[in-house]
Amino acid sequence: MTIAQDVRADDVDAIVRRIGEAAREAGDAVASASTQQRNRALRAAAAEIRRRAPDILTANAEDVADAKARGTKGAFIDRLVLTADRIEAMAAGLEDIARLPDPLGQVMAEWDRPNGLRIARVRVPLGVIGIIYESRPNVTADAAGLCLKAGNAAVLRGGSESFRSSGAIADCLTAGLVAADLPAAAVQRLPTRDRAAVGAMLRLSDCIDVIVPRGGRSLIERVAAESRIPVLKHLDGNCHVYLHSAADPQKAVSIAVNSKMRRTGICGAAETLLVDAAAAPGLLPPVLGALADAGCEVRGDAATQALDRRILPATEADWGTEYLDAVIAVRQVEGLDEAVAHIGRYGSHHTESIVTEDDAAAEAFLARVDSGIVLHNASTQFADGGEFGMGAEIGISTGKLHARGPVGAEQLTSYKYVVRGNGQVRP
């Protein structure tokens, strides 16, 4: 069952339950489908996205116009806007997912017992995955595609701001399923902007196996507080770049600027720049100048302000803020220990990078920082499932159970134990 139009508030619980029940039934069919059939659905959906690109752009233009009329900020608009290139990237991403090895049926481990039993741990689907996300309409394709690759059904609840865009994209996924003789209900979008639909999803533990929220802290906190279903958390991205005293000056500039300014509205954008105080007088001014030239507002501690009169004063709140905008906080630290401590106190366990030519310092940073992704001499904007070779991602998990970092098709599986015997009974 797929519902294309918005619904009345008093219908929400009933509609969400019917969608969940249909997803449960469809999930069984997707889980038993062949690799070739699931891949055929992904490729057909990609072709449909390309074919319907004008319709998707029209729907998106209406969403963007509404957002601007409400006075929405530029960074949010950037996440909402679709272009011809972004639509092509969605289609190409589905094809990349189709090319990935099938995670289902993979034998993760296998061993023999003295009594002759042969035991294997084998990957299986999670079942029905509920994805709750905010403004980015491309998540519709990424999330549905990864769920399908891993043999799961998907129930999608996109943000009200991208309601039309997400609906147009979801229709393409449905068309792909039908083309591959798979049930259309394997990918469904909740047909309402009503926030009550989120609560209805979170109570549907008999139909939905896992909830994946992707959005701001308020959404994650609501889901964590209300859900009766296990949650795969995607918290905010308060990401850090640390310029160690042995950083190459050119790398320091390019990595800091790219980490912050390539796309300021994504969760992998750097929000805080840490710099070794001993090296700051020589290392930091070119970085600050390049950030300013790129249009970035810099908020710094007193030592940083002394290096550049354009720097605004940073407050305690700045160290824990995910700006998602052309703003960065800069703090000088007394070496690696203080940098690691700062990240541990203020970070969100998302993505952190060290810039240094000192391999021992790099290895210490990579080992000690407790985040889903840690990098050496590379931009935090590589925090992306596509850049990791996963085709796409459903989010960056900042938790520690089940999955961490980019959540791709493999991370959307569980496992079961398959035991083969020859008449053994337990004494």
Image: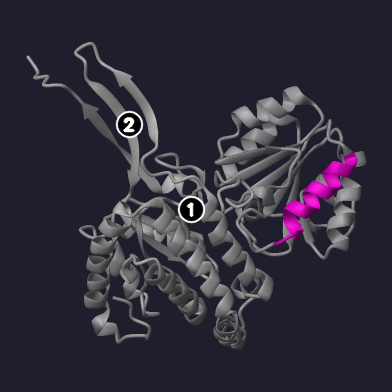
Assign the C terminus to one quadrant of the image.
Answer: top left
Residue behind mark 2: 121
Q: Which amino acid does label 2 sit on?
A: Arg
Above/below status of 355 relative to 134: above
Residue 10: where, in percent of width, then height? 24, 84
Residue 407: where, in percent of width, then height? 49, 49
Above/below status of 58 relative to 178: below
User: What stretch of residues is rendered in magenta?
Assistant: 249-263
Q: Of 74 and 49, which appears nearest the observer?
A: 49
Residue 36: where, in percent of width, then height? 42, 54
Residue 257: where, in percent of width, then height? 80, 53
Residue 255 painted magenta? yes
Tell me the SS state at disc 1.
loop
Residue 241 painted magenta? no
Q: Which amino acid does label 1 sit on?
A: His
Please report whichever mark, 1 or 2, sits nearer to the chain's N-terminal start: 2
